[in-house]
Image (cartoon, helix red, strand yellow):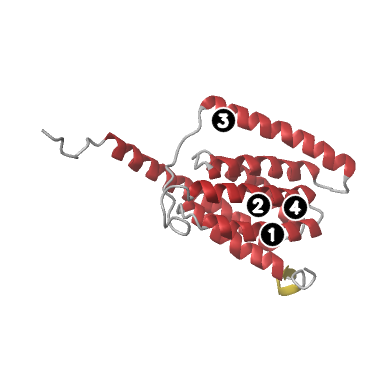
């Protein structure tokens, strides 16, 4: 792990470690895979979780580091759920349809995430040396909500990821993690791309569902 934390290159006076570069590459590939509905986004995401676990723990972002462990567990769940329909789907496009969450479920999810933010923020402020407990807590709680929605292919998960990215970018800049901040800027752009693409796919699903059954009926 010490070798992975060594500086790979310096850009604009900012050192970039091997582990941060690996996290950049796997993170970008993972989010692009989600936007395209490829099931292989999940194993790539698992590698990304391991990389950021090491990176964030080294910079005192304890909630973000703990988040990677939860991400890993949800990643396994999401991979299984996206590949559950039919053979040959482990590395291909997911057969699970895009769906929307109900109003009650959305309100409940956001309420739980806000409550978790408060609890985690207080815990970080009280029991750790974190100097950014509240944004760290927000990222942890709402990222879990977004990942849960992603695993279930709920379209609203993109809006939650957008909020997480908006908070993450300035946080990582303040920690000198310039490459990671750049990655999350790319994440933000990919979120808008993914949202647009999923909305288009949802319309296509609805149109297909409304088409009359062309199967001939036996006389």
The reply, left or right, for residue 92 in relation to residue 180 is left
Mark found first going from the N terminus, 4 or 2: 4
Kindly identify which residue carries mark 1: 50
| Residue at 29% across, 40% down | 208
Q: Quadrant of residue 96?
A: top left
Q: Mark 1 packing: few (<14 Cα in 10 Å), some, or many (20+)?
A: some
Q: Mark 2 packing: few (<14 Cα in 10 Å), some, or many (20+)?
A: some
Q: Is residue 181 visible?
A: no
Instruction: Name above or below for residue 84 compared with residue 5.
Output: above
| Residue at 67% across, 63% down | 179
Disc 2 from disc 3: Cα separation? 23 Å
Q: Mark 3 packing: few (<14 Cα in 10 Å), some, or many (20+)?
A: some
Kindly identify which residue carries mark 3: 106
**Place of residue 154 in the rendered image (x, y in percent of width and height, measured from the top left):** 50, 39
Front position among marks 4 and 2: 2
Mark found first going from the N terminus, 2 or 3: 2
| Residue at 63% across, 32% down | 110
Mark found first going from the N terminus, 3 or 4: 4
**Place of residue 90 in the rendered image (x, y in percent of width and height, measured from the top left):** 48, 57
Front position among marks 1 and 4: 1
Disc 3 from disc 4: Cα separation? 26 Å
Front position among marks 2 and 3: 2
Kindly identify which residue carries mark 4: 65
**Place of residue 46 in the rendered image (x, y in percent of width and height, measured from the top left):** 62, 57
Labels 2 and 1 touching (C-beta < 8 A): yes
| Residue at 49% across, 48% down | 82
Disc 2 from disc 1: Cα separation? 8 Å
Mark found first going from the N terminus, 1 or 3: 1
Disc 1 from disc 3: Cα separation? 29 Å
The reply, left or right, for residue 191 in relation to residue 118 is left
Q: Quadrant of residue 92?
A: bottom left
């Amino acid at each position: 792990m010490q070798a992975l934390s060594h500086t790979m290159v310096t850009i604009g006076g900012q050192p970039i470690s091997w582990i941060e570069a690996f996290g950049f590459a796997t993170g970008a590939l993972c989010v692009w895979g989600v936007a395209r509905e490829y099931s292989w986004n999940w194993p790539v995401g698992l590698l990304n979780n391991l990389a950021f676990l090491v990176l964030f723990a080294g910079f005192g972002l304890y909630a973000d580091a703990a988040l990677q462990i939860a991400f890993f567990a949800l990643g396994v769940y999401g991979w299984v759920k996206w590949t559950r329909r039919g053979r040959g789907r482990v590395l291909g496009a997911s057969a699970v349809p895009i769906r929307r969450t109900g109003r009650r479920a959305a309100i409940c999810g956001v309420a739980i995430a806000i409550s978790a933010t408060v609890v985690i923020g207080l815990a970080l402020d009280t029991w750790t040396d974190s100097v950014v407990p509240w944004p760290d807590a927000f990222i942890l709680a709402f990222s879990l909500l977004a990942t849960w929605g992603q695993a279930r292919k709920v379209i609203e998960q993109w809006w939650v990821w957008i909020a997480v990215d908006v908070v993450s970018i300035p946080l990582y800049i303040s920690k000198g993690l310039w490459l990671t901040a750049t990655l999350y800027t790319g994440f933000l752009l990919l979120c808008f791309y993914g949202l647009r693409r999923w909305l288009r796919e949802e319309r296509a699903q609805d149109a297909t569902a409304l088409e009359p059954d062309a199967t001939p009926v036996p006389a």
